[in-house]
Image (spheres, helix red, strand yellow):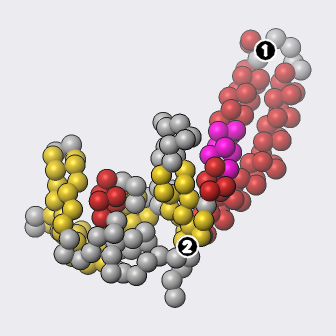
Amino acid sequence: MTNPLVIAKIPFDLKSFPASREADFFAKKKELQDLQAELNDLVNTKRPALVNRLSIARSMGDLSENSDYISAKEELSFMDGRIAELEEFIRNAKVTTPSKKDQVDFGHIVEVKNNSHTVSFKLVGEWEADPTQKMISVSSPLGQALMGKKVGDKVEVSAPVGKIEYTILNIS
């Protein structure tokens, strides 16, 4: 049985791109639940406590030299950004199941060969990507090039050292 996955539309990097620039974003159902729990904690616990801290700091007088006020205001701005990011993701998330293993898709382990070098990695969502653990994002240049391809297909990826060609050896 396959595990349900979550597909959502969110900006690639919310700090670098406007909210209107969206791309497919993939995540596991558990990951979505964790993000919902984080949002709930921020909105219902941490933000109200921070607003209270800001209010107390504001009541202490001169705001231009009030480090508690300045610090709380900066933290609130950062927290509001994270809340907006989480709300955007959760609002656009949809649950789906992965495709068969006959072509590369989210959640698959892919073995590729470049010249005489062979490597395997798992295609994962942005939030889960960790190249040191052989988990690459589906929105990375290599991830995008591999999506939908089959065993034996060749893909070419632009890199700082030039174009690199990979041959797909196995999909599991």
Tell me if label 2 and label 1 are in contact, CB under 8 Å.
Answer: no
Which residue is disc 1 drawn over? 63
Asked if residue 82 lies in the magenta stretch, the reply is: yes
Asked if residue 117 lies in the magenta stretch, the reply is: no
What's drawn in magenta, residue-wise?
A: 79-87
Q: Secondary structure at mark 2?
A: strand
Residue 113 falls left or right of residue 145: left
Mark identifier at residue 156: none
User: Mark 2 or 1 closer to N-term?
Assistant: 1
Which residue is disc 2 drawn over? 96
Marks 2/1: CA–CA distance? 50 Å
Across and down, in percent, residue 96 comes to 55, 73
Q: Amino acid at mark 1?
A: Leu
Image position of 57 with respect to 133: above or below: above
* Label 2 packing within 10 angstroms: few (<14), some (14-19), many (20+): some
The residue located at (50%, 43%) in the rendering is 21
Q: Secondary structure at mark 1?
A: helix
